[in-house]
Image: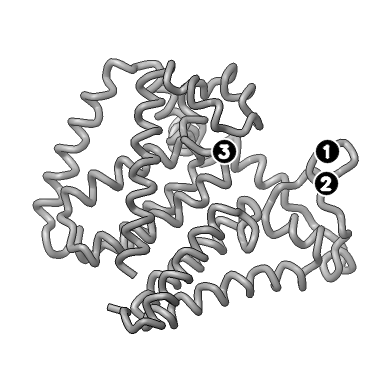
Amino acid sequence: MYFSSKAIFVIYTIQAFFVLICFLFPSVNELMEIFRSPDGAQYDSFGRYEGVKRLSLSGGQYFTLSASWVMSFIITSFYFKENKTTPLLIITFLIAFLFAGVSAGRIVFLGLFFSIFFLAKVLFVRRVLVTILACFMMSIIFFYLFSSYTDNFNRYINFAFELYYNWKQHGNMSSESTDILKSMYFTIDLDTFLFGHGRYMQDNGLYYLNTDAGYLRMILFYGIFGLLLNIVIDLIKLYLISVYSGYRLNFVAFILGASLFLIHVKGETFNHIVSVQVILYWLLFCCYFYNKRGFVE
């Protein structure tokens, strides 16, 4: 629905604005720390990503936030299409969203991919020349604005495009996070696969069996049937969103579902991340409300 997607667009535009302000003004970023969860603060404050991560006005700052950014890209793309937004404005907001979202996690590039896929006809078929000019202009403006923030900007670029730099320097497309993720998937026996172990954390407070990978962690806790139940619960929400929207959100629901399956590879997402669930329930309730009152457009 137009209203529900516009609300998501406005909320994440405000979030992108806060990220930009915190990036440009470290003193403001320090002030915003009172709104953030302390988890991981020491790593970012004294590590190589100081001034690059933990920039959002949000409690959680990492995977959970980046997952919701992916969802916002998809829903905002629907809003752009329904609103007949010009390519210049679309590209402007996509760049702003990407810059803000990647500060939470590089999985946000997935959202950009889905947005381009969703808006391909608007961006590349109808107004190719305008799109190319818009990209060129926005790139000049972007680099001009951040030229005086060389250290932070270089750290940001090195973080965002670590896969590319590793491929260029070492010949393999990998990053610290992808290497860690690979190590978190390992073989398990049939009993564990079917029924799990019923344990979520270890006695020392770390992840059970030291894995935070979405599919495996749910299997270790619930078994495969518990994992499937969580998947089905979210798929039902997406189905109802499609139905109550008068099937106008069929494609949106499909892309949201595809994104959930991919994000869950990285960490628990299905029926788990609060921000993602808020977005799904918001869409569901808005569609239900409009449907029952005959306002499905």
**Image quarter of residue 92:** top left
**Where residue 199 appears, x then y in whole percent?**
86, 54
Q: In the rendered view, tell whether residue 28 sits above or below residue 293.
A: above
Total number of numbered discs in the rendering: 3
Would you name the residue on which mark 3 appears?
59
Q: Camera-side residue: 166 or 122?
A: 122
Q: Camera-side residue: 130 or 70?
A: 70
Q: In the rendered view, tell whether residue 142 sits above or below residue 5.
A: above
Look at label 1 and name its amino acid.
Gly
Q: Are marks 2 and 1 in contact (CB under 8 Å)?
A: yes
- Nearer to us: label 3 or label 2: 3
Q: In the rendered view, tell whether residue 158 sits above or below residue 80.
A: above
Look at the image and tell me in which quarter the N terminus lies.
bottom left
Q: Camera-side residue: 96 or 275?
A: 275
* Disc 1 crowd, CA 10 A, few/some/many (<14, 14-19, 20+): few
Look at label 2 and name its amino acid.
Met
* Disc 3 crowd, CA 10 A, few/some/many (<14, 14-19, 20+): some
Would you name the residue on which mark 1 appears?
205
**Where residue 296 appears, x then y in whole percent?**
32, 79
| 267 lies left or right of 187 | left
State how far apart marks 1 and 3 are (Cα). 20 Å
Q: Which mark is residue 201?
A: 2
Q: Earlier in the sequence, mark 1 or mark 3?
A: 3
| 272 lies left or right of 240 | right
Q: Residue at x 12, y 64 (%)?
A: 126
Look at the image and tell me in which quarter the C terminus lies.
bottom left
State how far apart marks 3 and 2 are (Cα). 21 Å
**Where residue 2 appears, x then y in whole percent?**
30, 67
Given the current orientation, which residue lies at the most extreme left position? 129
Q: Residue at x 43, y 18 (%)?
A: 26
Look at label 3 and name its amino acid.
Gly
- Nearer to us: label 1 or label 3: 3
